[in-house]
Amino acid sequence: MNSMRLSDIYAPISADLKVFEGRLKRELTSPDRFINSIFGHILKGKGKRLRPVLVFLSARACGSVTQEVRDMAVAIELIHTATLIHDDVVDMAEMRRGRPAVNKKWKNDIAVLMGDYLYSKATNILAGMKDKEVPKMVSRTAGMMCEGELAHMKRRFDPGMTESEYMDVISRKTSSLLRLASSSGARLSGATPSRVKMLSDYGYNFGTAFQIVDDILDITGDENMLGKTLGLDIKRGGPTLPLILLKRSSSRRKNRDLFSGAGRLKRDIDKNDIIKRSMDMALGFADAAKDAIKNIDEDRHKASLDGLVDYVIGRVRC
């Protein structure tokens, strides 16, 4: 497996990311002191920028970074940040990116409105695009994300959810935005339809592997290292791949109590080799992501796309 550090993966687009950070800071600046204080809090909780990174790497692997590529990178980060703020309200999370979640620091009503505000800023950026299909792609993706999250909430504390149903949910609530990042970056760089399809498939498989890893880390991860509240899916009955696999391996009595008793749950997970089985599935999607772009005849940025897959898989040590 590739052992590239995140800094090495990002190196080919370092100049693009510098411009991106400046633009994002300008977008998250307000003459209103109260709004500006929330913007400042959000900016200090900087994440890994995976979605804008995918936009830039996909664009560079297929063509060049245009102004519309830069616009897309900022818009997609605003959308992603808005979804995190709204997710934290729904999940009653206390920590995000190593800092108090917006809902924890300013309460739910402020957090909901701030998420809406970030969506509106993204929409304003997208409205100016010459390629009118891209805003439509974003709108469809936003709808899919909402559908996926609603389906996820509907199945809380439901031990009957199957693997195929789980895959359908995460393809909408998580994979769709990562697929949008890679496919829009390629499209806006002037790539051919076949190249756009390659990057779209890459984004879908990368996003699916990412979500499975995230599910695993919700059980095995360290809050201080990951910078967010863990265990929320288990506490709130969220269907995750490890729990679905455990359900398939457990007795009917255990299925009824699947979401109770964290200590026993972890013992059952260890006993049934659930983490390894989940990782095997994540590795399958990781391999599919790399396979999707194997015919792209560009080395530097393609290597970073491959390295990004390995980085995500490497977050789990098993």
Image (cartoon, helix red, strand yellow):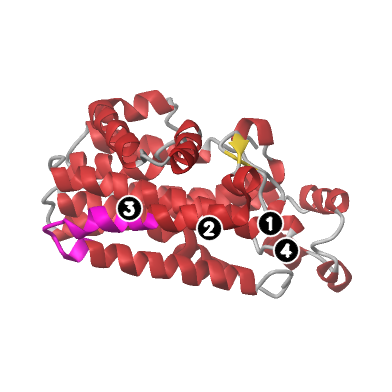
- Front one among 301 and 37: 37
The local crowd at label 4, few if under 14, some if 14 to 19, many if 20 or more residues have their Cα within 10 Å, is many
Q: Which mark is residue 270?
A: none
Give the alpha-carbon distance from disc 2 to disc 4, as whole Å: 23 Å
130 falls in the magenta region: yes
Q: Where is residue 316 shown, x and y percent of the image?
A: 60, 38
211 falls in the magenta region: no
- Front one among 217 and 149: 149
In this figure, which residue is indicated by the disc labeled 2? 112
Q: Earlier in the sequence, mark 2 or mark 4?
A: 2
Q: Which residues are magenta?
A: 119-134
The local crowd at label 2, few if under 14, some if 14 to 19, many if 20 or more residues have their Cα within 10 Å, is many
Q: Where is residue 278 shown, x and y percent of the image?
A: 62, 52
* The quadrant where residue 165 appears: bottom right
Determine whether the residue tagged by mark 3 lies in a helix, strand or loop: helix
- Front one among 40 and 222: 40
Determine whether the residue tagged by mark 2 lies in a helix, strand or loop: helix
- The amino acid sitting under disc 1 is Asp
Q: Earlier in the sequence, mark 3 or mark 2?
A: 2
Give the alpha-carbon distance from disc 3 to disc 1, as whole Å: 30 Å
Give the alpha-carbon distance from disc 1 to disc 2, as whole Å: 21 Å
Q: Where is residue 84 shown, x and y percent of the image?
A: 51, 51
Q: Earlier in the sequence, mark 4 or mark 3?
A: 3
Tag 3–tag 2 contact (CB < 8 Å):
no
- The amino acid sitting under disc 2 is Val
Tag 1–tag 4 contact (CB < 8 Å):
yes
Q: Mark 3 or 1, which is nearer the eye?
A: 3
Q: Note whether 70 is above or below 112 in the view shown.
A: above
Which residue lies at the image location 83% right of the left edge and 51% below the top edge? 262
Q: Which mark is residue 233?
A: 1
In this figure, which residue is indicated by the disc labeled 3? 121
